[in-house]
Image (tube, rainbow, N blue to C red):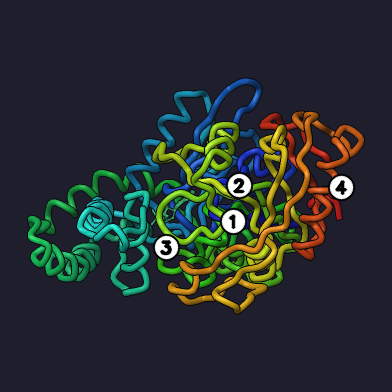
Amino acid sequence: MADVSVIGAQWGDEGKGKLVDWLSAKADVVVRFQGGHNAGHTLVIDGKVYKLSLLPSGIVRDGKVSIIGNGVVVDPWALAAEIKKLKGQGVHITPVNLLIAENAPLILPLHGELDTIREGAAKDADKIGTTKRGIGPAYEDKVGRRAIRIIDLAHPETLAAKVNVLLNHHNALRRGLGVAEIAADELLAQLKEISKEVLPFAAPVWKVLHDAKKAGKRILFEGAQGVLLDVDHGTYPFVTSSNTVAGQAAAGSGLGPDAIDYVLGIVKAYTTRVGEGPFPTEDQGPDGQMLGERGHEFGTVTGRQRRCGWFDAVLVRQTLKVSGVSGVALTKLDVLDGFEKLKVCTGYKIGDVVYDYFPAGQDAQAKVEPIYEEMDGWSGSTAGARSWADLPAEAVKYVRRIEELLECPIALVSTSPEREDVILMKDPFEG
Ligand code: IMP
């Protein structure tokens, strides 16, 4: 397989970092295709800890090309800070190993401010629980055809007019919200200053990717967030503002639909969610608390405590289908060690009506009650297992039952944060 796309199949935080790192070691090119610096993951390589938010995982490895595709919203100040931090850790970042799509839209300070104001002003039930990084407002401007894009920074002669169009919109909003308007010349000066840090990396990445594909290079597409946060297929409106499904890997980087050979869906052996919105199997009792403590369920970007609950096979079966997932990587199985009983959601009910999928309506999504199947837990440990023989019999049963409910093969099981602790059935890059 030349090209692999990795996506989170729940609400994000499925443990993609470890697997993306493992796969990026085998890839020639690593591509981010959606989201922005709302994502966050930690890589541990040779004992060194790297925290990435916007840069593709390939950046910390020599000899890889890292690409930020047009589907990403780029905060140039966050980008410059991340580059500086990584360079301080000894990572080489040059226009040879980092390329940013010329047509990627920018996140500006006014976007973060608007995100924060809106979240602050929303009534509790209407809060999305965003990362306040300006992601939503920046995508709104992209779709509204008034975004400033990377390439615009290279053309001061037309940038002023673009900034005026953008500010006509934003200053009207700001007047309505009672916050100070933004002066065009100040924003232009800020953009001029930061453009020096970003423009050297700007490139027609669609072309670079086509050439890489033609040359038989291995390309890894690295998804951020999870499919349940997809703006179309997720728990709308409690979602992020981009498409997180694997199909976006093509559109968000400038390749055709045949770009991806294998889609690896990362699935945690239980469920977590950050932010607001429906979560049918959430457990606010001692079991949920234990999952959170044992799984260290705190957000990488915002430090927020994640909501925790049982495995929801209905939701994941659906996300695997809408993303065309070829195989599943089941992660954090070891967090379930020691639970006497485990629950798996196999359907939903609203009154007498049973659903074998997650209904689309906001009201229905809030109302569904999970139908659970109970399974025996295990007293032994799965931590660090590298073969089926290392797993307690009940753990094997749990994994096999999940595979059956998901109607998708499990390609690998991850049993600890260590890179080698994996039970591998299929290597996505190996045919
Ligand atoms: P936004 O992407 O900042 O607009 O936030 C929208 C929703 O997506 C909120 O519920 C966030 O908590 C969630 N979200 C965004 N990025 C991540 C992530 O990397 N992991 C988990 N949740 C995320």
> Distance from label 4 to label 2 (Cα)?
19 Å
Mark 3 Cβ and ligand 1 under 8 Å apart: yes
Give the spatial CA distance, label 1 vs label 2. Answer: 7 Å
Chain-order first, disc 4 or disc 1: 1
In percent of width and height, residue 345 lies at 66, 59
Viewport quadrant of the N terminus = bottom right
Farthest top residue? 47
Determine whether the residue tagged by mark 2 lies in a helix, strand or loop. Answer: loop
CA neighbours of label 3 inside 10 A, class few (<14), some (14 to 19), many (20+): many
Quadrant for residue 416, please give it. top right
Q: Which mark is residue 358?
A: none
Label 4 close to label 2 by CB (< 8 Å): no
How many numbered marks appear?
A: 4
- Mark 1 burial class by Cα count in 10 Å: few <14, some 14-19, many 20+: many
Residue tagged 3? 238
Does the residue tagged 1 have its C-beta within 8 Å of any atom of ligand 1?
A: no
Q: Quadrant of residue 236?
A: bottom left
Q: What residue type is labelled 4?
A: Met
Task: In the rendered structure, find residue 10 and report the number of the disc placed on it.
Answer: 1
| Up-down relation of residue 338 to residue 368 (above or below) | above
Q: Nearer the viewer, mark 3 or mark 4?
A: 3
Looking at the image, tell me whether mark 3 or mark 1 is earlier in sequence order: 1
Q: How far apart are marks 3 and 1 (CA)?
A: 13 Å
Other-residue count near label 4 (Cα within 10 Å), few / some / many at <14 / 14–19 / ≥20: some
Question: Circle 2 is placed at which residue position?
Answer: 14
The residue where tag 4 is placed is 425
* Residue 174 lies in quadrant: bottom left
